[in-house]
Amino acid sequence: MTIEKNKLIEFVNFVNECCIVMDDSFVADWLNLPNCNLNMSTPLDLFKEGETEKLYRLLYFIDIEEADLY
């Protein structure tokens, strides 16, 4: 996994948000697993494409238990 240097702080902030919503031990797997809520893209793929709004929206729905982790 490679994150561009200029996106590193943004990525750390995103991972921190993930840790708030789900168990810390699952975050690394979740970032790399295809997700049906993201048209089977991985969260990491969407992050790299700059689709962070979709990811934060998904985290919100996971947090309120309106979306599954997968």
Image: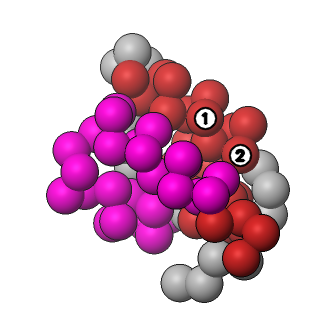
- List the residue tagged with mark 1: 56
Left or right: 49 in relation to 15: right
Q: Position of residue 5 (x, y in %)?
A: 71, 76
Identify which residue is drawn at 62% across, 42% down.
Answer: 55
Q: Quadrant of residue 16?
A: top left
Q: Position of residue 26 (x, y in %)?
A: 25, 56
- Most foreground residue, 45 or 38: 45
Given residues 52 and 5, the one toward you in this image is 5
Could you tell me the amino acid type at mark 2? Thr
59 in the magenta segment: no
Residue at x 21% of width, y 44% of height: 23
Labelled pair 2, 1 in contact (Cβ < 8 Å): yes
Magenta span of residues: 9-35
SS of the residue at dot 2?
helix
Q: Would residue 14 be found to the left or right of residue 46 on screen?
A: left
Whole-angstrom CA distance, mark 2 to mark 1, is: 6 Å
Q: Is residue 25 magenta?
A: yes
Give the amino acid type for the residue marked by disc 1 in the picture.
Answer: Tyr
Which residue is the site of mark 2? 52
Relative to residue 36, is residue 63 drawn left or right?
A: left
Q: Secondary structure at mark 1?
A: helix
For residue 31, which numbered disc appears in the image? Answer: none
Crowding near the residue tagged with mark 2, few <14, some 14–19, many ≥20 C-alpha atoms within 10 Å: some
Residue in view at x 73 percent, y 37 percent: 53
- The residue closer to the viewer here, 18 or 13, is 13
